[in-house]
Each structure stands twice: as structure tokens, then as C-alpha cells.
Image (cartoon, rainbow, N blue to C red):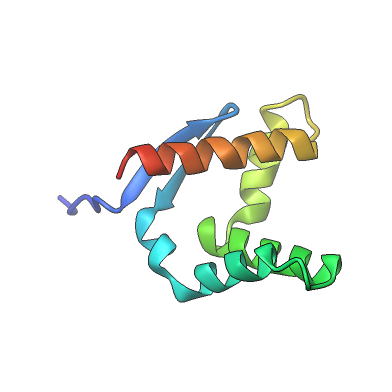
């Protein structure tokens, strides 16, 4: 029997289930992406690129798959509002499981 990784948190949000590795929040690449995303001196398109990089790190390279599941669970379309709610719920649940 394989050992269970206590760093992996199973999350349900907006009709989608994902596993998030809490250890990713200690990854300097994610910290850098979040810092760049918050840097209002950067052009919007550059901040968007950092946002996408951060999502790829958070979802372990499966961002598009997660987005497709989220769209399917929400009428076939993925609106910015739905994704923002999903992201907020994930952050809240990961934080509550610390």
C-alpha cells in the first residue's frame, strides 16, 4: 500500500474536484509568479503571463484540464467570474486545512 502524502489536499469547488499539493506554496516559482502578478508597475499582459505560470505550478501542469472540467460542470462555459470563485474557494479550503 502506497503511503498517503499529507501535503496533498483534496478540494471540491464549483462542481470540480482537484488535488492540491500544499508544498507548492513553498515553491519559489509560485511565490515569484504571485509577486509579479501583484506588481502593478508591470504591463497587464506581462502580469497575465505570470498569472498563467502560477496556475500551471498550482495545478501541476493541468490548468487546461482543470478549466475544461470547470466549464463542463458549469453549463459548458467558463466565465471569469466562475473561475475567480473557483480559485477563491480553493485558496480558502487549502488555507483551512493547514
Say above or below: 95 vs 53.
above
Residue 46, located in which quarter of the rendered image? bottom right
Q: Position of residue 93 (x, y in %)?
A: 43, 37
Q: Nearer the viewer, residue 68 or 43?
A: 43
Say above or below: 86 vs 43.
above
Residue 85, located in which quarter of the rendered image? top right
Q: Is residue 16 visible?
A: yes
The answer to whether residue 70 is left or right of residue 19 is right
Rendered residue at 36%/44% (across/down):
9
The answer to whether residue 83 is left or right of residue 55 is right
Q: Is residue 60 visible?
A: no
Rendered residue at 61%/36% (across/down):
86
Q: In which quadrant of the rendered image does the C terminus lie?
A: top left
Rendered residue at 84%/71% (across/down):
43
How many numbered marks, from 0 up?
0
Q: Position of residue 75 (x, y in %)?
A: 77, 24
Q: Position of residue 8 (x, y in %)?
A: 33, 50
Rendered residue at 79%/73% (across/down):
42
Residue closest to the far front = 41
Q: Nearer the viewer, residue 31 or 69?
A: 31
Residue 51, located in which quarter of the rendered image? bottom right
Amino acid at each position: 500500500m502506497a503511503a498517503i502524502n499529507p501535503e496533498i489536499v483534496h478540494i471540491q469547488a464549483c462542481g470540480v474536484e482537484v488535488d492540491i499539493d500544499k508544498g507548492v506554496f513553498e515553491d519559489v516559482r509560485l511565490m515569484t509568479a504571485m509577486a509579479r502578478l501583484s506588481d502593478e508597475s508591470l504591463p497587464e499582459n506581462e502580469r497575465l503571463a505570470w498569472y498563467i505560470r502560477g496556475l500551471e505550478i498550482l495545478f501541476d501542469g493541468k490548468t487546461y484540464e482543470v478549466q475544461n472540467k470547470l466549464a463542463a460542470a458549469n453549463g459548458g462555459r467558463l466565465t471569469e467570474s466562475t473561475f475567480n470563485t473557483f480559485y477563491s474557494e480553493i485558496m480558502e479550503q487549502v488555507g483551512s486545512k493547514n
